[in-house]
Amino acid sequence: MTEHDEFDRVRTWLTGLQDRICTAIEAADGGARFIEDPWTRPEGGGGRTRVLREGAVFEQAGIGFSDVSGERLPPSASAARPELAGASWRAAGVSLVFHPRNPYLPTTHMNVRHFRAMRDGATVAWWFGGGFDLTPFYPFDEDILHWHRTARAVCAPFGGQARYDAHKRWCDEYFFLRHRGETRGVGGLFFDDLHEDFDRDFGYLRAVGEGFLDAYLPIVERRKAAPYGERERQFQLYRRGRYVEFNLVWDRGTLFGLQSGGRTESILMSLPPLVRWEYGYAPAPGSAEARLADYLRPRDWLHELAG
C-alpha cells in the first residue's frame, strides 16, 4: 500500500466518524440538527464544519473534519521538530467540542488526527494523535468512573494498563492551566506523535474515535434532564471561561491552525456560545461549587472512585 493510499484510508474513516457522531448526537439531543458549512483553503485542502445550535440538550455542539496541506510548516510545528523545518505537510482530523445547556452535564472534547511531512515528494515523518477529555462543572463520581473505565477499555488491546496510564497522565499534563494551577477537567486520554506501526497505530486511533460515544452518551442520558436554577447556570458560564482560557492560551492545535492559515471560524468553533468572567470569584466554603476544586487535579480515578 502506498503512502497516498494510507492517507486516504485515514481520511475515509475520519469522514465516516464525523457522520456517525453527528447522527448519535442529534438523536441524543432530540431538538436540533447539525448545519454543515463546507469550506476550502486557498493554500490547500478544506473541510466541513458542522454545528448544532440551541438544541434541547446542547447549547452548541461543533464537530469539524479537515484535510489541509501546506508548502511549509508554521513556526509552532517546526520549533518542536527542527528537522522538519521547510517541509511540506498534510494533516487530516476530526475535532469536536460539545457545550451542553444543563450545568450538570459536562462539556467534552475529542480529537483524532493524522499528519505527514514531505520533502522532495517523500514522507519524512508521519504520526497519529488525539484523545478525549471531560470537563464537568458539578462532578459525579459515577460519571467520572464510567469515563475512565471506557478509556481504559479503549487502551486494552494496545498495551493495556500501561497504555492507559501513559495516555491518561499525558492528558492530565496537557490539559493543565498553568496560570490557574488546575486541570481543565477530569482528563481522559491524550497522545501525540504515535508512529511505531501504521496499522496498529491507526487501529488505536479508531478505537479512541469510536470509543468516545461509549464514554459520553451514558453521561448525557443520566444528566440531561437534571433540574437546575440560575445559580448553577451562572457557575457554568463562569467555569466556561476556563475553557476559553485554555484554548486561547495553551492549546497547540489552536496555535497551529491559526499560524498555518487555517479557517478561523472552524478553529474557534470550540469556544462556548455564552461565557462570563468575574474578578476574584470564590465559591462559598462547603458549597457544591467549591467541591469542584478537588476534581481539578490529577487523580487516580479508577482506584479512588472504585474503592
Image: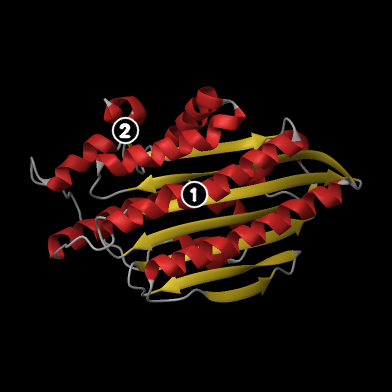
Classify 10 Å Cα crowding around label 1: few (below 14), some (14-19), many (20 and above).
Answer: many
Horizontal relation, residue 222 to residue 3: left or right: left
Image quadrant occupied by the N terminus: top right
**Amino acid under label 1?**
Phe
Q: How many labels does the image show?
A: 2
Q: Quadrant of residue 78?
A: top right
**Amino acid under label 2?**
Arg
Horizontal relation, residue 63 to residue 28: left or right: right
**Secondary structure of residue under mark 1:** helix
Residue 267 percent across, percent down from the top left: 54, 61
Q: Can residue 277 be seen in this view?
A: no
The residue to which callout 1 is attached is 212
Q: Can residue 226 be seen in this view?
A: yes
Horizontal relation, residue 10 to residue 103: left or right: right
Compared to residue 151, the image places residue 289 above or below, namely: below
Compared to residue 83, the image places residue 261 above or below, namely: below
Residue at x-position 14% and y-position 64%:
229
Where residue 297 is drawn, which disc sits there?
A: 2
Residue at x-position 25% and y-position 45%:
139
Q: In which quarter of the image is residue 41?
A: bottom right
